[in-house]
Image: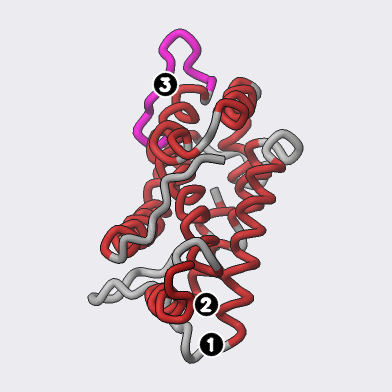
Amino acid sequence: MALLMDHQFRLLPADKQVETRPFLEACSYLPFFIDCLGPTLFAPIKAEITGNLTKIKAVYESNPGKYKTLQQILEAEKEQHGSQWPRVGATLALMWLKRGLRFIQVFLQSVADGERDEANPNLLRVNFSKAYDASLRKYHGWLMQNLHKAIMYAAPYKTDFLKSLSKGREVKDEECLEKIRKFLNNFSATVDTIYEVFSKMNADLEYKV
């Protein structure tokens, strides 16, 4: 669990502005989290997260003062791109990234809550299925849905996953789950806030891939 706890997301300020630099720094470790699920099988998900982070980072680094928060990026791009927005730039990258973050959020919360298939308690299929349904399924066509179904059935055992999060150390399951809950405090608040911003700005797109 050290993997996530060593790179926690920041506590949001009262105005719920998400600072871009700390957000990108925290997100930069999520690909290593994906590796805990399976570095080869989950490579497409890892690549998508990394690609979207790269696009957002490029916009931020072009003018850190102007793009200090994610909200400022969306507002600036809306003004800059006019009718093309939100299907462009860092806005589009963040739209897809937040869905990946929601997947991770729901998956980890489901694991932490102890949701499982009672007949196969060491499998993670129930947790993956819940996360996928809550975050990505509606945006995926038949081909992508079947790809993710195959990935779900090839997911690691829960015990192996928790051991990977702990960087191979032997840690009691409940200790690891408690650290997941602590990680989720700031992580979930950040993800929920990004969703709220997209909703308020009407920046979400419903097309499928």
Q: Residue at x 42, y 46 (%)?
A: 206
Give the extent of the magenta segment.
111-123
Q: Position of residue 101 (x, y in %)?
A: 48, 51
Q: Residue at x 48, y 67 (%)?
A: 84
Does dot 1 land on a helix, a strand or a loop?
loop
Q: Are marks 3 and 1 in contact (CB under 8 Å)?
A: no
Q: Amino acid at mark 1?
A: Pro
Question: Is residue 155 something one can see in this rendering?
Answer: no
How did the renderer colour the structure?
secondary structure
Question: How far separated are the C-alphas under marks 2 and 1?
Answer: 8 Å
Which residue was labeled with disc 1? 64
Q: Are marks 2 and 1 in contact (CB under 8 Å)?
A: yes
Q: Is residue 87 left or right of residue 18?
A: right
Q: Is residue 155 left or right of residue 40?
A: left
Does dot 2 land on a helix, a strand or a loop?
helix
Answer few, some or many: residues within 10 Å of disc 1's Cα (few below 14, many 20 plus, some between 14 and 19): some
Is the residue 49 above or below the residue 164 in the image?
A: below
Q: Amino acid at mark 3?
A: Arg
Which mark is nearer the camera, 2 or 1? 1
Is the residue 179 above or below the residue 156 in the image?
A: below
Q: Nearer the viewer, residue 19 or 159?
A: 19
Answer few, some or many: residues within 10 Å of disc 3's Cα (few below 14, many 20 plus, some between 14 and 19): some
Which residue was labeled with disc 3? 116
Q: Most prominent secondary structure in the magenta stretch? A: loop
Q: Position of residue 43 (x, y in %)?
A: 71, 42
Q: Position of residue 129 (x, y in %)?
A: 46, 27
Q: Residue at x 60, y 64 (%)?
A: 53
